[in-house]
Amino acid sequence: MRKIIYLAAAAGALFLVVSCASTPPQQPKPETPPPQAVKPEQPAAAVPEAPDAELAQAKSLQQRVDALGLGTYDPEDYAAANKDLQAGQDAYGKDNAASKKSLQSAITEYNAVLTKGGASYLAKEQEQTEASKKAADDLKASVAVKDDYAKANEIYTRALQEKDAGDIEGASKDFPQARDDFDAVAKAAQQKKDAAVQALQNAQQDKTAAEQKAADAEKALKDEGFSTSSGGQ
């Protein structure tokens, strides 16, 4: 009986040893770190667009001012506009923000030249045209050269309307045209006047000559003892 109990205890001990050897010890699981918040990507800084519209407008205004020759009528704004246009072109594609700012300044300054310089320019053109018109009026050209005077006056009236409407290009063409036409009708009227004066002088000279001939003939008759009366001797 003891032997049996001993064998059973030995078998149990052996089973326990084998069981422990076959089962590996449990390792503690590593702690999982909490997920980190994903930072949103920072958008790339926006690059200013090239100021193409401003560049085109500034150049167009410069060409308009130069075509009319208005720079001499407002030299300060004209010089500033040219300087800012050049600065805008130099910065174009390198620093578009600075380029746009310079070009906007140039646009403002060129418009100032058109406003102030244009007004001075057209005032001078109007003054010269009115001087030609007065010369034609003094010669009564509206009567002597009626049709041509009417055409010149029509162009002059149109130029005044264009000036008031701010149409510098239109007025800059019509004022000189009207001036040339008034000069032409004044010349024609002067020629007609000169011809009339010459005709009058010729008539007076003919009259004087005729009167002188009559006086000479009367004297000759008297010298011969003839009576100048219609009754006879």
Image (cartoon, rainbow, N blue to C red):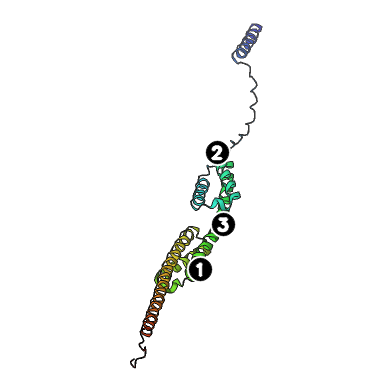
Q: What element carries label 2?
A: helix
Q: Residues within 10 Å of mark 1 (few under 14, many from 20)?
A: some
Precedes in sequence: disc 1 or disc 3: 3
Precedes in sequence: disc 3 or disc 2: 2
Q: Where is residue 198 in the image (x, y as percent from the top left)?
A: 41, 71
Q: Is mark 3 on a helix, strand or loop?
A: helix
- At label 2, the amino acid type is Asp
Q: How far apart are marks 3 and 2 (CA)?
A: 27 Å
Q: In this view, does 53 lie above or below 119?
A: above
- Dot label at residue 90: 2
Picture quadrant of residue 195: bottom left
Foreground tag (3 vs 2): 3
Q: In which quarter of the image is the C terminus?
A: bottom left
Nearer the observer, 190 or 101? 190
Residue topped by disc 3: 115
Q: Position of residue 63 (x, y in %)?
A: 49, 49
The reply to whether dot 3 and dot 2 touch (C-beta < 8 Å) is no
Q: Residues within 10 Å of mark 2 (few under 14, many from 20)?
A: some
Q: Residue, x 43% and y 72% (percent of image)?
A: 197
Q: Distance between the residues labelled 1 and 3?
A: 28 Å
Q: In this view, does 220 lie above or below 20?
A: below
Q: Residue furthest left?
A: 232
- At label 3, the amino acid type is Thr
Nearer the observer, 223 or 178? 223
Nearer the observer, 101 or 129? 129
Picture quadrant of residue 48: top right
Q: Quadrant of the N terminus?
A: top right
Q: Is mark 1 on a helix, strand or loop?
A: helix
Residue topped by disc 1: 134
